[in-house]
Structures are given as structure tokens and as C-alpha cells.
Amino acid sequence: MNTKRRRSTDRGEGSTGIMRASGIVTAIVVAIGLAAIGFGLLGCAKPERPPAKNPEELLTQLKDDRARIDQTTDAMMKRIDEFNSSRKPGEQTLQFSEVFNQDLSPEQRDVLNSMVAEEADISYKALLQTIIADRDTIQGLQDNVARLEQTLPDSFVVAKNGDSQHDLAMAYLTQDSKLDAEKAKVLLSQADQTDELLPGNKVWFFYDPQRDTFRTYVTQGEAGKTPLAVRRANKRALTQERDTFKVESATFKGERDGAQAEVASLQEIKTGLETDIATLTQTKYQLESTVARLSDDLAVRENSLYFHAGNEKRLADQGVLSSVLKRVRDVKGLTYDESLDLRQGTTITLTPESYGLEEIREVRMLPPIYQEGRDFTVETLEDHSSARLIILDPEMFRGKEVLLSIRG
């Protein structure tokens, strides 16, 4: 790709898949009329959560925080609209961008505080105070989301004019991850993507070859808006246009034409919600599949013995073993890339050809905390053509790493 890819160091926004899920939930709540304006309870601080233990727990925390950001933002917009509708001609009104701008100076913040102090109506004074509390809640949640996202090993590119998330993801999978085009298409068909990509947005990617999983999402970056914010702005613009059209229709064409336009708009929203629900269901299945795979991998890790077997002379030449005392001296650089699942067996068979030897006369296990005869035993054939390491106490070796020094 032409755009330079970097490791993630600043994740101010969340993954498109999880943000889209939170937007779906908010849309459903608004559609069925259960989102009350008094949603300020979301501003109450939640108890500090323990760190995520695994990727699926981290994704759950991110999904929860982004859902609360989305719901609190909707509530704040409704409160701003309610406050503005109470203003008389010439009186100062509020805009969401003015209230939530991250770069507000102390003087600008004082303007909002002054409006609170000058407001005579107690109910609207409380409304302004709730708007300020909503702003602080959203900023706190965004800080938490950024902190959580910094633990993800993802990379990103900055979108340019004309870029699409699909094309950028295809380039990442085929060029960086070295996958063929057909495999990349299959992975992309399982990932949520957006059409509202803006120049300056950051498009994130992560492919795990071991689990064959891929995720991609979009954050605000230098664009100033996320795809979710664009969709919401468009939705608000469409809603305002619809309301204006309804008024004009009532004036010039009668209530019948206005009612027909309303029915058409609601049908479009209904169709969109049904599509979003289907996408959310698919995301749920994907997350459940990921949890199952991670659980299986964890079980294998906890029940396996990991070992590195090598020619004793070579280990000494590499500086791993002391050439005089035959003790472990430096295991840096060793990879314990062989394993034995102790749930399925307790025997490791060693052949001399695998280690550049003509015969095997002795096998030692290091570190020496493990005792032969008590924890394990070694059986060598009389012609020294092979040897077997037999684990006598599997519990002692679960999840451990050992070095096998083979002497010919």
C-alpha cells in the first residue's frame, strides 16, 4: 500500500465491528421509543474493572464502553435540542460540537458555565448541568476505550481521498500478510466494513495466521469524524429534512402527502434495522467461535510439555551448556517449538538422525530439578538406534519448558 503502516499507539476511537454493533443497539432503542431523555444515569461512574484476561474479554469491555458512549451522546443531543427549543429569538443556543470540542479553552468552558449561572429556570439550569456531566462522561469513556485499544496488536493506514476500507484491507491481506486473493476475499466477507470512509480516517487491520482470523475497523484519525459520526449526522440531516418536508406538505399538499412520506421513511428505517440485526447476529456467532478457539488453545497450552531437544556437543558449542560441567549456562535464543499434549500421551521418541548423530547413548533433562526415576525415565535401545523419554508424573510437567541434551 502507498500509505505508511504503523503500529497502533493512539486509538481514540473503536473498532468498526463493535461500534457498528453499538449503533445498531442505539437505533433499535430509539426506534421502539425506549430511550428516555433522562439517560443521564449513564454519566454515573462505573467501578474500576480488572484488566482483560483474554481477547474476548477485552472486546466485551470495548463493546460495553462504546455502547455507553453512543447512548450518552444520543441523550446529550436530545437534551441540547430540548434546551435550544426553549430559547427565545436572539437568545444563545448550544451546538453539540461546541459542547464536546476536545480543544475547548478555559474561557470557552466558562461560557457554558456562565449559561448555567445565568439560567433563571431551575429545570433548564439542571438540564445544562446534565449536558456538562454527559460531556465529562463521554470524554472519560473515550479515554478508557483508548487505553484498552492500545493493548491490541493492530496496524493501520491513513485513508486518502477515494480509498475504500475493502481495497485497503485487500492490500493488507495480500501484500503484508502474503495471502492469495481468494483467501483474502473469504476473510473480508466475514468482516464488517463501512462505506463512509473519510480522508484522514485510520483504517486498522489485524490478521492472526495461527487462528486464521482477521479484523478491520475505522477510527477518527485526522479526519475529525468517525464513519459512525458521519452516519449519525446523515441520519439527523435526513430526519430534519423529513420534518421540514412534513410541515411543507401539511401547508401546500395536505396531510395525506405528509403521511405517505412518513410511511416511506419509516419503512426505510425498518429495512435498515432488519439488516443491522442480521449483521449483529453474524458478529455474535463470530465472537462465540473465537471464544471457542481460544479456549481450546488455552487447554492445549495448560496440558502440554514444551521441549527443545539438541545434540549435547552443539548445545555446548552454542553456549547453552557448560562444556565442563554439562550444566545449563545460557538458554537465550532457544525456542521450545516441540510439544507433547500430556492428555494424549506421555512418551517422546528420539532418533539420532534428527540431531546429527549416529546413535543415542544418553538423554538428560534440564533443568536438573526434575529427577530421573521419580519424575521421568529414559529408555535406550540396546543398539542405541533410538531412545524414549517417558513422563512418570504428568502433573509436574503441564505447561513447563525443558531442555533435552542428547549424547551420541
Image (cartoon, grey):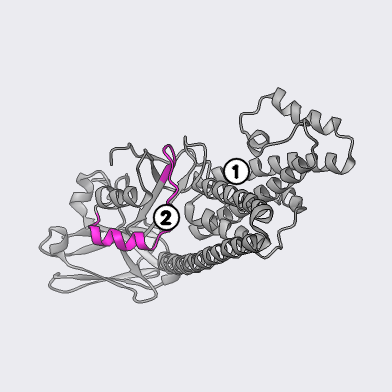
Inspect this view and state whether residue 53 appears. no
Helix or strand or loop: what does disc 2 sit on? Answer: loop
Residue 183 highlighted magenta (yes or no): yes
Residue assigned mark 2 = 193
Residue 113 relative to residue 286: left or right? right
Callout 2, which amino acid? Gln
Magenta segment boundaries in residue numbering: 179-203
Measuring from the top left, give residue 252's x and y in whole percent: 65, 53
Q: Above or below — where is 280 with respect to 367?
A: below
Measuring from the top left, give residue 403's x and y in whole percent: 31, 57
Q: Quadrant of the N terminus?
A: top left
What residue appears at the point 67 percent right and 65 percent down from the top-left corner? 32
Q: Nearer the viewer, mark 2 or mark 1?
A: 2
Q: Quadrant of residue 188?
A: bottom left
Helix or strand or loop: what does disc 1 sit on? Answer: helix
Pick whichever, 127 or 141, lies toward us.
Answer: 127
In the image as oriented, which residue stretches furthest toward the left?
A: 358
Callout 1, which amino acid? Gln
What residue appears at the point 57 percent right and 51 percent down from the top-left corner? 238
Residue 228 relative to residue 381: left or right? right
Residue 222 relative to residue 348: left or right? right
Q: Quadrant of the C terminus?
A: bottom left
In the image as oriented, which residue stretches furthest toward the top?
A: 107
Residue assigned mark 1 = 142
Pick whichever, 77 or 87, lies toward us.
Answer: 87
